[in-house]
Amino acid sequence: MSLQFNKEQMTELNRLVAHYPEGKQKSALLPVLHLAQDSFGGWLPTEAMDYVASLLSIEPIEVYEVATFYSMYHLKPMGKFIFEVCQTGPCMISGSENIIAYIQTQLGIQPGETTKDGLFSLKLVECLGACGYAPMMQVGKIYKEHLTKDKVDAIIAEYRLQAKA
Amino acid sequence: MGVKLLLEKASVPGIRSYDVYRREGGYAAVEKALKEMSIEAIVEEVKKSGLRGRGGAGFPAGMKWSFIAKPEGVPRHLVCNADESEPGTFKDRYLMEFLPHLLIEGLIISSFALGSNDTYIYIRGEYAWVATILEEAILEATKNGWLGKNILGTGFDCMIHVHRGAGAYICGEETALIESLEGKRGNPRIKPPFPAIQGLWMRPTVVNNVETLAAIVPIIKMGGEEYAKIGVGRSTGTKLISACGNINKPGVYEIDMTISVEDFIYSDEYCGGIANGKKLKACIPGGSSVPILPANLLLKTAKGETRYMNYESLSDGGFATGSMMGSGGFIVLDEDQCIVKNTLTLARFYRHESCGQCSPCREGTGWMEKILQKIESGKGEMSDIDLLWDIQRKIEGNTICPLGDAAAWPVAAAIRHFRDEFEWHINHKELAQTSNFGLQHYADPIHVPA
Ligand SMILES: Cc1cc2nc3c(=O)[nH]c(=O)nc-3n(C[C@H](O)[C@H](O)[C@H](O)COP(=O)(O)O)c2cc1C
Ligand code: SF4
Ligand code: FES
């Protein structure tokens, strides 16, 4: 098996599993899948899911059924930066549609697509609990709120720069 | 200025850190509860306070606590519901982000009262940075002896664990949350057995909302009776409201539930009025699941009385002319908003979030979205409105968990109060693509303060 956690990631795995009683290590599945996704290039290939199953001593199917249920796990390769823009009611009435359209033009992609350079993916998501700070999107672990066209430009520039660094 | 019990210290610089929180009187409630009070006395104070669950259902917290089974030798668990995914709701995030130690303090007291040695905070996966803030706060509390073994020499051991979800609204439902915490898909369980008897790992479990558990701190400090004097009737204490949509000052506000809806929307202390000088059209006062109300029924009840921001007044008139306090997600729509489109985004949300176990919910949410999409895009027929009505009725009450109802209610209320707007969409297919029904709905001039 080529996919493996390094020493640091192993320490984190053990920290996560220690939150649950003995024999209940399956409870760590969601947090461990987050760790795997963060560690293995931002998505969960079958190999990564099988690896997680072996680490938690559960059947691979128990991992697959969970990985396919939750929206934060990606089952195919994604762009380096994923723009997850909220499209639910409160954001919609606060102007999310214009922002989504603007991002589409600026990146030249439709929702669900990734730019050719592999830098950006666009995904439309449902309410992220930032309705008062709409329109908004999540990029990685960060919320970008009160979006305007200017702000979107600045954000794209910021990540382009980050990718070069 | 209304009474502030939870957010009183929110603007103190550095209050997120243990040192500042402690200097401001933090953890005094833990000292009082663990050193001076018995478990029974704590539960009694919570009962006297009249505190109702802040997660949406409004179930009395003290009563819920008294249901927990205590079989010999079986561990019990407290689980804090921080899944917060109901559109319009972002109050728990605010509380955890700015006052993490207030929640930790409430969790320690509640864990003590329930006998939970391992307490879990189930936080929605997207709030990753909030989870980090909580973990840091837990570390600080542990270093200072508020968590860990033999807390304050009482012999009580307690640890708080943060568990990140991974994107699923349904995991806010308490039995789905428990399944998810066990590392499974978030499929709600059939009740009974209730979590208080068989919950997490089939052990007795209490699930409470973040705000409910934070409110335990002022209740212990001031006593249940004093807490109950704040507010009105069965709406005791204070409530966090997250206000959003077309208002001047979106944000999280703590109210004492005696203020009128009109004051809440128009006063500068709270929402500051409708943005851009527009008029109020409608409002979803308690998170996306509760019935939408047109402005006239929002500000005044059907009897013509002032409507207030509390459990009883918001639901005055039942579903025919009232709504619900719900989760406190207050969504305001101005005159430019289209009810059909707004309802469509909510229908899409529920279709996306249905776990798929029950056919009325799995299929019904999909149909409702499709029909609304059809009407919105100018292809609707008159019979579609009745079909929508029929579908929502067949979902309601016929499912394992209340998500089915939550999906049905917004559609039902939109048709109930805005049927003419749906009809206009169908009769003016082209016009509806470029313009808006606006406020034509109101036969009577609505009450709009100058
Ligand atoms: C579909 C659905 C989603 C829910 N989401 C949440 C949530 O995000 N947070 C929450 O506290 N309660 C949520 N609830 C309510 C919980 O099931 C439960 O009643 C609540 O956490 C109990 O806490 P409380 O009594 O302190 O309010 C949800 C219920 C349903 C049916
Ligand atoms: S009502 Fe919907 S979300 Fe709830 S259990 Fe049934 S299918 Fe799942
Ligand atoms: S609706 Fe967009 S964050 Fe809530």
Image: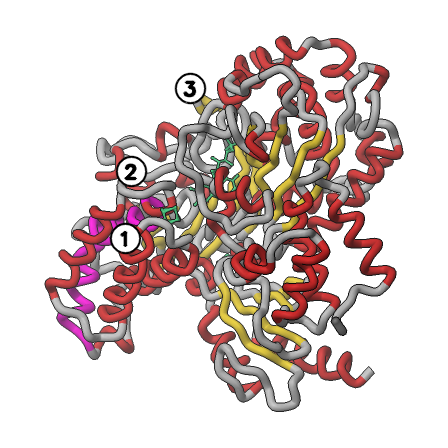
Q: Do marks 2 and 1 share a chain?
A: yes
**Which segment is the magenta one?**
B405-429
Q: In this rendering, is residue A109 above or below B345?
A: below
Residue behind mark 1:
B411
Q: Residues within 10 Å of mark 1 (few under 14, many from 20)?
A: many
Q: Do marks 3 and 1 share a chain?
A: yes
Residue behind mark 3:
B233
Indicate the chain on which mark 1 is placed.
B
Q: In this rendering, is residue B95 above or below B185?
A: above
Q: In this rendering, is residue B194 above or below A55?
A: above
Label 3, label 1: how many angstroms apart (C-alpha)? 31 Å
In terms of image quadrants, where is residue A47?
Answer: bottom right
At 72% from the left and 16% from the top, the residue drawn is B33
| Res. B240 in view | yes
Mark 2 and 3 residues: CB-CB less than 8 Å, in contact?
no
Residue behind mark 2:
B322
Front residue (pair A135, B449): A135
Number of the front mark, 2 or 1: 1
* Residue B412 included in the magenta stretch of the image: yes
Residue type at tag 1: Val
At 64% from the left and 68% from the top, the residue drawn is A139
Q: Give the number of marks.
A: 3
